[in-house]
Amino acid sequence: MAGQPLTLHRRRTPAVPIAPMGTLLLRSLVLVSLYYAVALWGFLFTPDPNGVALVWPATGVGLALVLLHGPALLPAAALAAGLVSWQFHLEMMPLAQALGTTAATLAGVALGARLLRGLGFSPRLERVRDTALLLGVGALAASALAAAAGAWGLALGGRELDFTGTWWRCWMADLTGLMLVTPALLTWLDPHAPPLRAGVTGGWGMPLLLVTVTILVTGMTYSPLLPPALAMPLSYAVFPAILFSALRCPLRITTGLILVSGAIALSGTGLGFGPFADMGQTTGLLSLNAQLALLALTGLLLAALRAEREAERERARRHLDELARAGRLSTLGALSSGLAHELNQPLCAVSSYAQACRRLLARGRLQELAETLERLEAGTRRAAETVRQIRSFASGQAPPRHTLDPATLVHEVEALLRPELRRRGVHLVLKLPEGIPPLQGTPLQVQQVLLNLLHNAMEAAEGRQPAQVCLELRREGKALVFIVTDTGPGIPPQRMERLFEPFATWKRGGLGLGLSISRDLVEAHGGRLSARNPPRGGAEFRFDLPLEDPHDVPAASPSGGR
Ligand code: ADP
């Protein structure tokens, strides 16, 4: 309707698009043929002297096709119901009642399809709610109405019969027919269903085996070969096959098995064989219908539960993919920030050396100029190496390991920090024991950790009395411990917990990455980085690295300072 708000239709099943005339005619033909065939089959097994069929799947056929292809098929359903009434009902009831029965059956199909569409039913039957809806609406609307029509027609046909009992038997026959036929038609004839694939078991061997087992077991049960005492327990043997199929095979295989086993059971019973044939009219019919309805319900519900779980797993997998993508993006962000952080140090040093060069040039001190230029060059090499290592880290490559001389590493770091220390007026004390055994590691990374810790310590000590930072190397067991202390204010206890978290910063313009990167680098070398406020004041950061060759290291002694 023009101007109608769209939200009114949100929960409904989307309308079926109108098919071209040729397709519509073909679908109508399929409906009429199927409807007529199943009605014929139902009438073949009519043990009730009043003409109530053992099973009445015609309503289920009408409902399935109207659900799949829309109300455009209702005229075909009317034609099929009329044809069946003319062929079969006229023998049992006058024309007016036969027409009334046809109209009521059609109303049941139309109402059932309309209600199901309105309630958002999906013909794929991949949710428990779809099975429940099909059963509920089918039982309460379509089957109840069609059964009432049938019982009413028979009662008015001049027969001496109990209306309630007849309606009850009609309803059961209708509902069982609907439960056997409708799911199979919905899943097999859905034009939008994905192509049939073998189930989780891989190939087609398992579905074929299940079909064979179902036909054999049900065929045996409802044949004259077995005495009823044996046939009764065997009638339950089809359950495992259906349950296995529901858990392992595509839904279409399960609905097909339900239909095949139901058809064999009903045909056998109609012919007077099987465990329910000798039970007496009402009891036998009730037992057979109840067993078939339970079989169909169990298979459909289990298959729907499995489909729901698979859909849930798929949703979780997609969610994980999204998280991983978000994680990659945030790693990229952290990486760029890390790059900026790690490059800051060498670039600052390069800039200080460049200023020094200009001063030395102006004063004509060429020898010192050459030395400073060498340091400047080393700074640019360092920046380039940092970029290279971050790139190889991003691509997942481990940086090469070397044998490191800790004293050389420390002196290089001191040279890098010298201009900055001078500018801030901070004094650096180095306590290096003699004869320190070599370490295994990536020189640039160990230096990066030292630079980060010393830089933080320098910032903390700046402007304090005394403004001092100390780096001490100490051998403890099989590890070499690096201890950085300062005369700063120390770390406020409330910050301790988050100190090593990425982006945890309490500095104006800080990135909060130095400590987190340092901890990762130390751990990548098999060590541990920790922080504390020692009793004498200031902050203390220490990390240990395993020694390559654990010889005795003499006690620490001051070896230099600035
Ligand atoms: P940033 O220096 O960019 O803030 P870091 O990860 O290097 O990032 O340091 C995180 C925080 O740890 C700093 O903001 C500072 O509050 C604290 N911190 C680090 N070193 C010291 C220190 N030597 N003394 C006091 N606080 C420190």
Image (cartoon, rainbow, N blue to C red):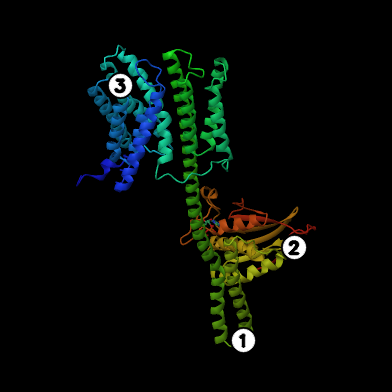
Pick the residue in front: 128 or 507.
Answer: 128
Q: Earlier in the sequence, mark 1 or mark 3?
A: 3
Q: Nearer the viewer, residue 274 or 520?
A: 274
Label 1 residue SS: helix
Q: Residue at x 39, y 23 (%)?
A: 173
Left or right of residue 215, residue 153 in this image:
left
Mark 2 → mark 3, Cα distance in angstroms: 107 Å
What kind of residue is marked 3? Glu
Q: Seen in the image, is 228 located left or right of residue 187?
A: right
- Look at mark 2 in the image and give the residue it sits on: 438
Q: Earlier in the sequence, mark 2 or mark 1?
A: 1
Residue receiving disc 3: 91
Where residue 66 appears, as percent x and y from the top left, is 32, 37
Residue 107's image quarter?
top left
Quarter of the figure with the N terminus: top left
Would the CB of label 1 be found within 8 Å of ligand 1?
A: no
Residue 289, quarter of picture: top left
How far across and down, in percent of the image, does residue 43 sit? 38, 24
Q: State the separation of the CA atoms marked 2 and 1.
A: 36 Å
Identify the element where label 2 is drawn. loop
Q: Which residue is mark 1?
A: 366
Q: Amino acid at mark 1?
A: Leu
User: Quick one: label 2, few (<14), some, or many (20+) residues within 10 Å?
Assistant: some
Q: Nearer the viewer, residue 112 or 548?
A: 112
Dot 3 falls on a residue whose secondary structure is helix
